[in-house]
Image (cartoon, grey):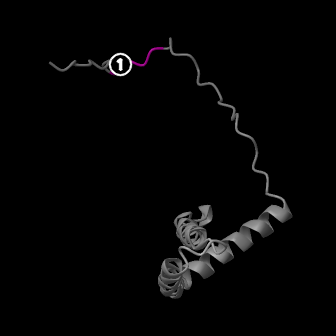
Amino acid sequence: MAQVIKFPKPRSDKSSDNPPPVAVTSTRMPYRRPSLPRRVRHGLWVGLWVLVVLTWPVWRWLAVFDLFIQSVRTMYYWHTPSMHPGLVLLMHVLAIAALAAFLLCEPKDMK
């Protein structure tokens, strides 16, 4: 069974036993504007993010083409001792995954 919580009933008579209201002081720090280098870095970050978001369809097509070429190249050079095509393909996949993760990290003030 559920617990029933009984709330106190409001008083109908205004008695003087209530203490006077106390002024609440804020414990928050006052707002401090970020420094100029931090604002510039944030502006460049937001600008880069917007540029990548707007050009994402082109990046996606280039990524698909690049991964296809790297996959074919990996299959062709797989047994060549000094080429390391598997690592090159892995680096391309990780770079594209990093680009996609960058798109998911929306800047704070963009919402």
Q: Is residue 102 above or below residue 22?
A: below
Q: Residue furthest toward the left?
A: 1
How far from the left and from the top, in percent, is residue 80? 59, 75
Q: Is residue 15 left or right of residue 91?
A: left
Q: Tell me the element at label 1.
A: loop
Judging by the rendered image, the residue that carries numbered circle 1 is 11
Q: Residue at x 77, y 67 (%)?
A: 41
Q: Is residue 106 left or right of residue 32?
A: left
Q: Residue at x 65, y 30 (%)?
A: 24
Q: Is residue 87 left or right of residue 72?
A: right
How far from the left and from the top, in percent, is residue 81? 63, 71
In-front residue for pair 90/106 = 90
Residue 71 is covered by the magenta coloring? no
How far from the left and from the top, in percent, is residue 22? 63, 25
In-front residue for pair 39/87 = 87
Classified by dominant secondary structure, the portion drawn in magenta counts as loop
Quarter of the figure with the N terminus: top left
In-front residue for pair 89/82 = 82
Q: Which residues are magenta?
A: 10-15
In-front residue for pair 35/10 = 35
Q: Residue at x 62, y 81 (%)?
A: 51
Q: Residue furthest toward the top?
A: 17
How far from the left and from the top, in percent, is residue 5? 26, 19
Q: Please tell me in which quadrant of the rendered image residue 79 appears.
A: bottom right
Q: Please tell me in which quadrant of the rendered image residue 43 appears.
A: bottom right
Q: Residue furthest toward the right?
A: 36
Q: Is residue 62 above or below residue 25?
A: below
Q: Is residue 28 above or below residue 43?
A: above
Question: Would you call the spot at circle 1 few (<14 residues within 10 Å), some (14-19), or many (20 or more)?
Answer: few
